[in-house]
Amino acid sequence: MRNMKDKVVLITGAGTGIGAAVAAQVVEEGGYAILVGRRLEPIEAVAAKLNAPDAVMVAAGDAGSAYQMDRIVREAIDRFRRIDAVVAAAGTVETGAVLDLSDDAWRRQLHSNLDTAYFTAKATLPALIKSKGAFTILSSIAGLQAMPMTAGYVVAKHAVIGLVRSIAMDYGHEGVRANAVCPGWVKTPMADEEMQPIMAREGVSLEGAYAHVTSDVPLRRAGTSDEVAELCCFLSSDASRLISGAVMNIDGGSTVVCVPTLKM
């Protein structure tokens, strides 16, 4: 059975969406959450909502910066003495095929989705080795397949799966587990923004846009942040102690669909 009691979990991208949902579940189950985000205001808002000052640490900083992540990890260990698990949920998406992306947009996508995971891993691995802990990265079904007009995001999300496998391979003998979670459509503020062009084009509401993009998904719906957070917390807990190097889809069945046969 999953049990987060007394677990110290560092969460990047904790100011919104899946990261915030992970923090809530950790604290609700008696664990401790280190909330990392680029902007102070959103993570402070999450901390205020959790209303558990003894169990929550707010740490503003860029997860894609080695210097800032080293600082945050030092502060976290000073306060909680250890880190048992990491959930790397930081990331953004920008649209554009290869010829459409500016060089800056390309670098932003690699920074926000790949650098953040890499530098978070590099900063936290010494602590995870001591605790024989777990490292979970939020990839995406875009890390398994190509989505249209999102070249930078697709490349970065494929790359973080390689990072997970490398960590699992290189640090498994030290007791560290590493896994990737690949959500499909999930109702988050970031996904809500992606729905805007569909709403305009199809003349539908936000819910109608989600229904449109999931019409060929076997379960016929988008997921929720809480559902993805449940999987992240499972992988961070002792209940998953033999799971490492895994790539887990949580997509309503999206990746089992044989696209060429949909119109048969």
Image (cartoon, grey):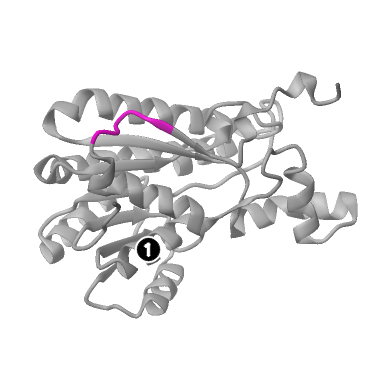
Where are the magenta residues, as a range? 242-247
Residue 132 picture quarter: top left
Quarter of the rendering occupied by the C terminus: top right
Q: Quadrant of residue 76?
A: bottom left
Left or right of 174? Residue 135 is right
Where residue 251 sits in the image (x, y, percent)? 58, 40
Q: Is residue 38 visible?
A: no
Label 1 environment density (alpha carbons within 10 Å; few <14, some 14–19, many ≥20): some
Helix, strand, or loop for circle 1?
helix
User: Position of 191 compared to 227: left or right?
Assistant: right
Residue 193: x and y, percent?
68, 55
Q: Is residue 77 left or right of residue 62?
A: left
Return the residue nearer the eye: 74 or 81.
81
State the predominant SS element of the stretch in magenta: loop
Q: Of 100 and 257, which appears nearest the observer?
A: 257
Considering only vertical position in the picture, is 159 above or below 44?
above
Residue receiving disc 1: 25
User: In the image, what residue type sits under mark 1?
Assistant: Gln
- Of residue 125 and residue 116, the one placed in the foreground of this image is 125
